[in-house]
Amino acid sequence: MGKREKDLSFKEWIVDIFKDERGAISVKPVIAFVGAMFLCITMVANSYSAKDIAPSDKLVDAVMIITAIGMGADTLDKFTSKKAEEPKKEEELG
């Protein structure tokens, strides 16, 4: 494994996770990350709370589906991204 051009700091690495193939922040990984955090927090909170204040199973399933779609869509974008085509030079007519 070759050394990268520049070593990323932890903060730059975290920001780089949420970027798409163009280098802009993409909403899909952000939604997937936030959804995964909510699911983890919900599971931990439900471990220590009473059964009668637990969130609806359907609500938890909906968040899980949205999170899975966000992760899947982001993964597909990473593997199916097309390289930017080089601009074609117009040939002079004459």
Image: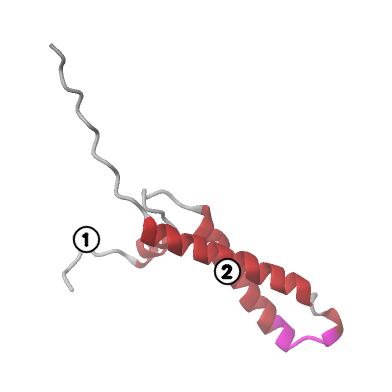
Q: Looking at the image, is 46 positioned above or below residue 60?
A: below
Q: Residue at x 64, y 75 (%)?
A: 39
Q: Residue furthest left?
A: 94
Q: In the figure, 60 relative to 8: above or below?
A: below
Point out the stretch of residues depicted in magenta: 45-51
Q: Position of residue 35 (x, y in %)?
A: 61, 67
Q: Nearer the viewer, residue 82 or 54?
A: 82
| Mark 1 closeness class: few <14, some 14–19, many ≥20 residues within 10 Å | few
How far apart, in angstroms, are the residues tagged by discs 1 and 2?
A: 32 Å
Magenta highlight on residue 77: no
Pick whichever, 49 or 79, lies toward us: 79
Quadrant in which residue 36 is drawn: bottom right
Q: Residue at x 32, y 65 (%)?
A: 9
Of marks 1 and 2, the one in the foreground:
2
Between 40 and 69, the residue placed more toward the observer is 69
In the displayed image of the protein, which residue is found farthest to the right?
A: 52
Secondary structure state at the residue bearing disc 2: helix
Which colour style is shown? Answer: secondary structure
- Secondary element at tag 1: loop
Residue 90: horizontal and vertical position, in percent?
20, 23
Q: Amino acid at mark 2?
A: Ala
Quarter occupied by the N terminus: bottom left
Total marks in image: 2
Indicate the position of residue 76 as horizontal and vertical percent values.
44, 61
Q: Which residue is mark 2?
A: 68
Residue on which disc 1 sits = 6
Seen at 71% across and 88% down, the residue is 47
Q: Rate crowding at label 2 as few (under 14), some (14 to 19) or many (20 or more) other CA atoms within 10 Å.
A: some
Does 28 sit left or right of 64 as displayed? left
Q: From the viewer's perspective, is residue 26 above or below residue 67?
A: above
